[in-house]
Amino acid sequence: MARVKIAIPEHFTFSTQIPVRIQDVNYGGHVGNDAILSIMHEARLQFLGNIGCTELDAYGVGMIMSDVAIVYKGEGFRGDVFLVEVTADELSPFGFDLVYRLSTEREGKKHPIAEGKTGMICFDYGQRKVTRLPEALKAKLIG
């Protein structure tokens, strides 16, 4: 079976810490796949806030997630604090990718949790159509 592969950049432009909550843990006793996506969403909102925008107003446009890929690397547990690193990649005339790397530290050792990618498309919510990536947003993403 072919596996999903995500190209991980050498440098990430943003990082945040997100604690694992009890509702993130599934019946297997570890962080569920749905919770990893939710944690990536929270990190994305923080990343965007850090560059002065939101998903609904990114220098004059909104955004829609067009695709997502997640590769699980290890288990996360209640009480872990995830370091979530985020950076923009593969800018196009209409959008960009965000790449994520999640890890945690236990007993002085770094443990990889997941790698992810979300494709973000610029969207005009008023006209309900795809629109171009604004130069101001592009400048912030390539920083």
Image: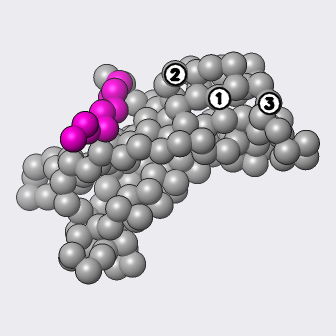
Say which amino acid is labelled 2.
Glu
Q: Are marks 1 and 3 in contact (CB under 8 Å)?
A: no
Comes first in the chain, label 2 or label 1: 2
Q: Quadrant of residue 10?
A: top left
- The answer to whether one can see residue 50 in this image is no
Estimate the spatial distance between the alpha carbons at disc 1 and disc 3, rounded to whole Å: 9 Å
Precedes in sequence: disc 3 or disc 2:
2
User: Could you tell me residue 65's position as x and y percent?
Assistant: 60, 45
Residue at the outermost front position: 1
Q: Position of residue 93 (x, y in %)?
A: 69, 19
CB contact under 8 Å: marks 3 and 2: no
The residue located at (16%, 50%) in the rendering is 111
- Which residue sits at x=30%, y=45%? 71
Q: Earlier in the sequence, mark 1 or mark 3?
A: 1
Q: Label 3: which residue?
A: 131
Disc 3 versus disc 2: distance between alpha carbons? 17 Å
- Assess disc 3: are there few (<14), some (14-19) or many (≥20) residues with their C-alpha within 10 Å of its C-alpha: some
Secondary structure beneath dot 2 equals strand
Which residue sits at x=10%, y=52%? 108
Q: Tell me which corner region of the image, top left, top right, bottom left or bottom right, holds residue 23.
A: bottom left
Inspect the image, locate mark 1, and give the three-letter code of the amino acid beneath it. Gly
Residue 119 appearing in the image: yes
What residue would you read off at disc 1?
95
Q: Amino acid at mark 3?
A: Thr
| Side (left or right) of 93 relative to 14 | right
Which image quarter holds the C terminus?
top right
Residue placed at 45% from the left, 52% from the top?
40
The secondary structure that dominates the magenta segment is loop
Element carrying mark 3: loop
Q: In the rendered structure, which segment of residues is drawn in magenta?
A: 1-9
Query: Which residue is tagged 2?
Result: 90
**Above-or-below relation of 51 to 46:** above
